[in-house]
Image (tube, rainbow, N blue to C red):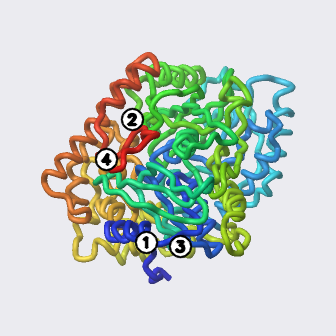
């Protein structure tokens, strides 16, 4: 069952080969942006039989797609906004992910919705949840269940008794967004797409008024090349306007960045057997069970007009989350309880409201110019719909027949055989000499690719040991991230291939040297390279922690921006007029 053909590795050898392909081949579709939408477009186009290239200036999911609320969900609050089409679409995608596309990555998650008003609220919430349970054809998760106050408190004894009059259970899902995005990209590569990170677009190639390609610059060493194709798709999220300006195109829509901040606390700080959703005066607050050891609490919703690559959380953001959650907790959380903080930017379509929490999460796609398509808006859960809409729009610029999308039938790498392998956990544990708990951890991260991962430890039993100061992960996982998952820097591994940077109070600093030395042979790092990677990572963590003590966005951004870039040649922002050497 597990001896399947080796999947497409995104490692150093592939990266160098991809550079040659970018400069030599002519593609049907060139995708800019390595978030979940860009990766989804690459997968959609590749599985339609098209020649595809995807370039990303930094790392896969290094922007919004690693900083979400970690859920595949319909968006319960969008029912109140009467966005029934969006909710229906998202719930369909949730069902597909759970049942077919990514059962190894997307997991059911039980929520408690505390009721706070007697009389009207229970029938009101019931009506909404009946819609929620039925609109997406919920087959993989249970329906709602009503609770008395006592029953709700038995599930969540950490809540104050006077914080609720009763409750309702319903289900959504949880997902490691960065790992899911990376897996979408690897699946696209498996079907023939050329995927290359640390490859920044610095210009567009035109013939008359038609876009025929892009100019790219390697964010590691500064070399440049040209990539030509029938159509270019701008899937850069909050960078959409920047890329439109670089193309000298006005665009059909604009994107506003809305900052969402989340905090991570240990599981034992909140006594609850279920995740919780709380209403606030502005929106909702999620308390999400993350792995077996942590809660993720979020989110905020404020305009952001500063550095798009490194949005900074402020003391005000963190205080807001603590104040909201502490309103309902018996034992309040403090700053000392927080193991991690992350801030992400939602790419919202501008012009619909002055309040970002009221902006639509619908997406928009437009042909900006002949050979150039842009897509923006939407939400993580609906990435697949956004992808096929973008490819459908781009089809008019592709000089051959483009078949319809088939991605609803294409499981992501690791999905096939996952359920059978879960049943074989004891056998796999014996085969590899790893505790069954570890096997389940690996299956829920890699699915049926588990043999690829553990195969790297053949003859190297030390790789099957935990990372010393981050024991939730095996050492071989860091090696696999560099060998197969396109990780090029320490931050890629600590913040996205694993979640060490938010799951441990040391934020990864205490593991940085060990992880750097593990991946150095794979990435060809010298001792000087190891030292630089550790110094850059530690400086980034220091800057983030210091920025989180600041009262406002401007001061937090100033501190965060002082940290050095791991990718030494990345341009931020890209100058609109490039010298000939670039």
Find residue 38 and report its image quarter.
Answer: bottom right
Crowd band around label 4 with a 10 angstrom C-alpha radius: few (<14), some (14–19), many (20+): some
Dot 1: element: helix
Mark 4, residue position: 569
* Residue 289 drawn above or below residue 15: above
Cα distance in 3D space between marks 2 and 3: 33 Å
- Looking at marks 4 and 2 on the same chain, the residue that comes earlier in the sequence is marked by 2
- Looking at marks 4 and 3 on the same chain, the residue that comes earlier in the sequence is marked by 3
Residue contact at pointers 2 and 3, CB within 8 angstroms: no
- Looking at marks 2 and 1 on the same chain, the residue that comes earlier in the sequence is marked by 1
Cα distance in 3D space between marks 2 and 1: 47 Å
Q: Looking at the rendered structure, which numbered label has been put on residue 339?
A: 2
Residue in the foreground of this view, choosing between 495 and 241: 241
Residue contact at pointers 1 and 3, CB within 8 angstroms: no
- Looking at marks 1 and 3 on the same chain, the residue that comes earlier in the sequence is marked by 1
> Where's residue 489, x and y in %?
31, 52
Crowd band around label 2 with a 10 angstrom C-alpha radius: few (<14), some (14–19), many (20+): some
Mark 3, residue position: 423
Q: Looking at the rendered structure, which numbered label has been put on residue 24?
A: 1
Q: Which residue is drawn at 50% across and 39% down?
A: 295
Dot 2: element: loop
* Residue 39 drawn above or below residue 378: below
Cα distance in 3D space between marks 4 and 1: 23 Å
> Where's residue 9, x and y in %?
40, 71
């Amino acid at each position: 069952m597990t001896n399947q053909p080796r999947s497409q590795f995104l490692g150093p050898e592939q990266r160098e080969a991809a550079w040659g392909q970018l400069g030599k081949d002519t593609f049907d579709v060139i995708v800019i942006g390595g978030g979940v939408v860009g990766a989804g477009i690459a997968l959609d186009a590749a599985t339609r039989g098209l020649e595809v290239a995807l370039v990303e200036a930094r790392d896969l999911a290094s922007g919004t797609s690693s900083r979400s609320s970690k859920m595949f969900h319909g968006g319960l609050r969008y029912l109140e906004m009467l966005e029934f089409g969006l909710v229906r679409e998202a719930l369909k995608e949730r069902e597909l992910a759970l049942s077919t596309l990514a059962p190894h990555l997307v997991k059911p998650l039980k929520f408690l919705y505390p009721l706070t008003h007697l009389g009207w609220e229970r029938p009101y919430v019931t009506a909404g949840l009946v819609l929620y349970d039925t609109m997406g054809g919920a087959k993989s998760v249970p329906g709602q269940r009503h609770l008395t106050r006592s029953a709700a408190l038995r599930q969540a004894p950490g809540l104050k008794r006077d914080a609720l009059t009763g409750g309702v259970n319903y289900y959504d899902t949880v997902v490691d967004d960065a790992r899911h995005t990376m897996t979408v990209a690897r699946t696209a590569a498996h079907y023939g797409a050329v995927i290359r990170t640390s490859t920044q677009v610095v210009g567009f190639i035109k013939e008359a008024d038609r876009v025929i390609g892009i100019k790219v610059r390697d964010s590691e060493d500064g070399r440049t090349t040209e990539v030509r194709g029938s159509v270019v798709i701008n899937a850069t999220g909050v960078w959409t306007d920047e890329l439109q300006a670089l193309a000298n195109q006005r665009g059909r829509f604009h994107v506003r960045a809305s900052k969402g901040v989340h905090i991570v606390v240990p599981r034992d700080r909140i006594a609850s057997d279920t995740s919780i959703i709380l209403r606030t005066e502005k929106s909702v607050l999620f308390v999400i069970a993350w792995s077996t050891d942590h809660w993720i609490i979020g989110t905020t919703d404020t305009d952001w007009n500063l550095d798009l690559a490194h949005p900074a959380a402020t003391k005000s953001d963190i205080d807001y989350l603590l104040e909201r959650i502490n309103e309902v907790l018996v034992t309040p959380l403090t700053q000392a309880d927080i193991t991690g903080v992350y801030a992400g930017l939602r790419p919202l379509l501008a012009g619909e409201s002055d309040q970002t929490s009221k902006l639509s999460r619908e997406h928009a796609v437009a042909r900006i110019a002949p050979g150039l398509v842009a897509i923006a808006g939407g939400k993580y859960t609906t990435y697949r719909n956004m992808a096929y809409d973008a490819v459908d729009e781009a089809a008019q610029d592709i000089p051959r027949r483009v078949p319809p999308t088939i991605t609803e039938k294409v499981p992501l790498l690791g999905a096939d055989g996952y359920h059978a392998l879960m049943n074989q956990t004891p056998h796999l544990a014996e085969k590899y000499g790893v505790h069954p708990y570890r096997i389940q951890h690996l299956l829920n991260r890699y699915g049926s690719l588990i043999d690829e991962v553990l195969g790297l430890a053949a003859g190297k039993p030390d790789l099957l040991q935990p990372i010393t100061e981050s024991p939730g992960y095996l050492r071989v996982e860091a090696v696999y991230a560099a060998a197969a998952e396109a990780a090029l820097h320490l931050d890629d591994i600590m913040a996205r291939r694993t979640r060490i940077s938010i799951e441990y109070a040391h934020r990864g600093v205490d593991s940085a040297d060990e992880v750097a030395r593990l991946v150095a042979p794979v990435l060809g790092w010298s001792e000087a390279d190891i030292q630089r990677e550790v110094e850059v990572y530690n400086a980034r963590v220091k800057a983030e922690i210091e920025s989180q003590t600041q009262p406002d966005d401007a001061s937090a951004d100033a501190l965060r921006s002082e940290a050095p870039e791991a990718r030494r040649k990345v341009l931020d922002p890209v100058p609109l007029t490039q010298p000939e050497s670039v």
